[in-house]
Amino acid sequence: MVESIVGCKWSMGVLDAIDDGVHRPGELQKTCAGISTKVLNERLRKLCRFGLIEREAYPEIPPRVEYHLTTRGKKFVPILDAIRQLQDELEDTGS
């Protein structure tokens, strides 16, 4: 699971956006510039399957769907932040 998330720039971006308060699919697509609807939906399904986010559908017309971090997802985000910080440090030193 970790390899699948860390190895995918879109998964990390989607998790970051949800952690930053972006919860609706349309907003996520705008926040993650360049991601297609198909790829976004694949990432959302995968993150739900891994138990990092949960999907909440509201019985409204038009239908409204929101995604939120689960307890597991909230634990996972700092790990991704640490990996990103390490990557930035390595790039800064040229190693």
Image: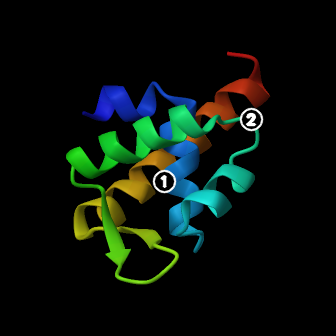
The mark tally for this picture is: 2
Indicate the quadrant where residue 34 lies. top right
In whole angstroms, how far apart are the C-alphas of marks 2 and 1? Answer: 16 Å
In the displayed structure, 63 sits above or below 41; it is below
* Residue pictured at 68% horizontal, 47% vertical: 32
- Left or right: where 93 falls relative to 16: right
Q: Are marks 2 and 1 in contact (CB under 8 Å)?
A: no
Q: Is residue 8 left or right of residue 5?
A: right
Q: Position of residue 54 (x, y in %)?
A: 29, 64
Local SS, label 2: loop
Q: Which amino acid, mark 1?
A: Leu
SS at mark 1 in the image: helix
Q: Nearer the viewer, residue 47 or 74?
A: 47
Relative depth, front residue between 24 and 81: 24
Quadrant of the rendered image containing residue 25: bottom right
Looking at the image, residue 62 lies above or below residue 82: below
Q: Residue furthest front?
A: 61
- Residue placed under numbered mark 2 in the picture: 34
Tell me the number on the disc at residue 15.
1
Disc 2 marks a residue whose amino acid type is Gly
Q: Residue at x 56, y 56 (%)?
A: 16
Q: Nearer the viewer, residue 90 or 42?
A: 42
> Can you say whether 51 is above or below 22 in the image?
above
N-term-proximal mark, 2 vs 1 = 1
* Residue drawn at 57 percent across, 32 percent down: 9
Quarter of the image that includes the N terminus? top left
